[in-house]
Amino acid sequence: MEEYSSERLSRLTGMLKRRGLILPAFEIHGGAAGLYDYGPVGGRLRNRVNQTWLDHWQSLGNIVEISCPTVTPYAVLEASGHVGEFSDFLTECTKCGEASRADHLVEDKYPNAESLSRDELASLISEMKPNCPNCGESSWGNIVAQNLMFNTKIGAGKSGRDGFLRPETAQGMFTSFTSIYRHFRERLPFGAVQVGKGYRNEISPRQGMIRLREFNMAELEYFIDPEVQPIHDFSSWSAPVCLISDEQGEISMTLSQAVNDGIIRHPTVGFFMGSTMDFLVNIGINPNHLRFRQHESTEMAHYAQDCWDVELLGSYGWIECVGIAHRGCYDLEAHEKATGQRLRAWRTFKEPKTVEIDGWTIDGAKAGPAFRALAGKVKSAIEELPAESSFPMTLNIDGQELEVRDEHVKRLQRTENMAGEWFIPHVVEPAFGIDRIIWHLLDHCYTETEKSGETYTLMTIPEIIAPVDVTVLPLYEKDGMGELAKSIHRDLCSRRNVFSIYDASGSIGRRYARADEIGVPWCITVDHDSLNDKTVTLRSRDSGEQIRVPISELEF
RNA sequence: GCGGAUAUGGUGAAGUGGUUAUCACCUGAGGUUUCCAACCUCAUGUCGUGGGUUCGAUUCCCGCUAUCCGCACCA
């Protein structure tokens, strides 16, 4: 097991920068905290991780990919709860000027103060008079919301609307629900995936790629009928995994056992946990440095019912890289309330239900002129009345006593057949921090060994995400070996989804070392024999083995 | 955001109030070399940024930006 040390970390980050995988962005202008570039090697690595992620989920068969804007109108994120929740409330000590988080000042008495509103916090602070942790005085100014989303204006000048850069891709999937629902012919379950950028104006980005202000995320929103018991196949995950449960602490058990015991509160969450683990291990994450941690009820996001993080161990300790949340009906309901649009699915009953309606309603032709503006409210009140009501009666509507007479009302009696009902689907969301995952796979694949007494580094990146598939090396750039190597290189590059590098500088050993350092799985060497018999040497990064292969049979 | 430290070629380091800032590796060109960081010659490329002190600042001082370490934060 690789030892993580700060020395190894600095060698790794130095290599990533030197070899063009990951670099601080805008460095010639002094840099900018929390912003990183994927360089000439990293760019393709990121792309392949994204593509592998998409392929992984699309293989389920009921998943579509969509792509939504990052610029998002204010109303969308207000409806989702982000404007209200995605911020910290700060208040300044008027004596020393130190800013403190308002919820922290009262959390002795209210352990879950994070969930309090601004007004509640203000009244609690004036009541409890907490002391300033800096100067000890108790004299607090107004509470201001420090929002962690990037503000922007959509449009210019006065006509510009307020907006934000999205803090997650998820909202686009929810606001597109009806289109996705129609695409799937209105049959649950189905899911939508999206990979793209998200933004958070972090107060203090730290730890390199771990906390970024602009980051790559990949999210799946999987819509399910809460009344249908899902059937998932857990048989491929027979080994126990490390779970840190809210109630039981760290335990080791299989996913199916954890679902059966109710530790994982929904089978689909458990299924996605297993599927997520498969994806991560496939792209090079060390399974021994992976664990699942359940959110405690107090740290759960405003939308979640249950949430399991995948944490990966690397140079910065255990870092949450994936969150698998059961969001219930929170999001669709929130957007439905804000817009009045129906964001529901239709559930057909096994047997149509008949509902006897027996009650009263108004006779519009009489009641309308009689009650005028109040007629609508009278109608609602009348329809609430039991069938055995008798008229005339007196109703109190908006403080007015109204006499409702026989002539104003009609008996309502009929039998309705209901074939089904509209309901708000529930959502299970695996949300991946791509940058954190890429960081950890590089951290896990970075191997320092010795070769003839010298330190030797190689990246054991799996072939499916290797940024470079193959390098083509002429033993010497003379006698036509260079030309032959270049033609092989061009042929490989022209193939679908294959990327080759041509490298002719330095000794052959140096070039193998360079290829190993960025994790190129295969090297092709063109030598004198190649000119005659049209064969080349194919060298494996991981085994160092070399075999002779005809140029016409190179398989990439 | 607070406290502390740091900032010198692509990378890692050395050094200085005064002529042209040093070294290794890397990179490029040429030579040599018949498959795992070899060697020879030559070449490219640096004092984060703005201000101050000074005849003169990469060096001293201040601001800014960034990085690292604590604290705090982490939907």
Image (cartoon, coloured by chain):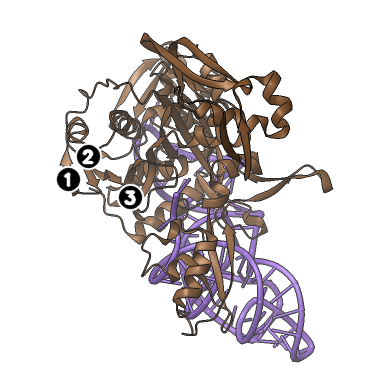
Chain colours: A brown, B purple
Q: Give the residue type at disc 2.
A: Ile
Contact (Cβ within 8 Å) of mark 2 with mark 1: yes
- Mark sitting on residue A251: 1
Q: Nearer the viewer, residue A396 or A340?
A: A396
Q: Tag 1: Cα neighbours inside 10 Å, few (<14), some, or many (≥20)?
A: few
Label whose residue precedes the other's in the sequence (2 or 1): 1
The image shows residue A284 at horizontal and vertical percentages of 34, 36
Label whose residue precedes the other's in the sequence (3 or 1): 1
Q: Give the residue type at disc 1.
A: Ile
Element at badge 2?
Answer: loop
Residue B58 appears left or right of A153: left
The image shows residue A116 at horizontal and vertical percentages of 47, 58
Q: CA distance from mark 3 to mark 2?
A: 13 Å
Q: Nearer the viewer, mark 2 or mark 1?
A: 2
Element at badge 1?
Answer: strand
Q: Chain of mark 1?
A: A
Q: Chain of mark 2?
A: A
Vertical relation: A385 (above or below) A440:
above
**Residue A533 visible, this orientation:** yes
Label count reads: 3
Vertical relation: A462 (above or below) A139:
above
Vertical relation: A34 (above or below) A392:
below
The image shows residue A268 at horizontal and vertical percentages of 32, 28
Label whose residue precedes the other's in the sequence (3 or 2): 2
Q: Nearer the viewer, mark 3 or mark 1?
A: 3
Q: Nearer the viewer, residue B19 or A259?
A: A259
Q: Tag 3: Cα neighbours inside 10 Å, few (<14), some, or many (≥20)?
A: few
Q: CA distance from mark 2 to mark 1?
A: 10 Å
Q: Give the residue type at disc 3.
A: Ser
* Residue highlighted by disc 2: A263
- Mark sitting on residue A297: 3
**Residue A101 visible, this orientation:** no
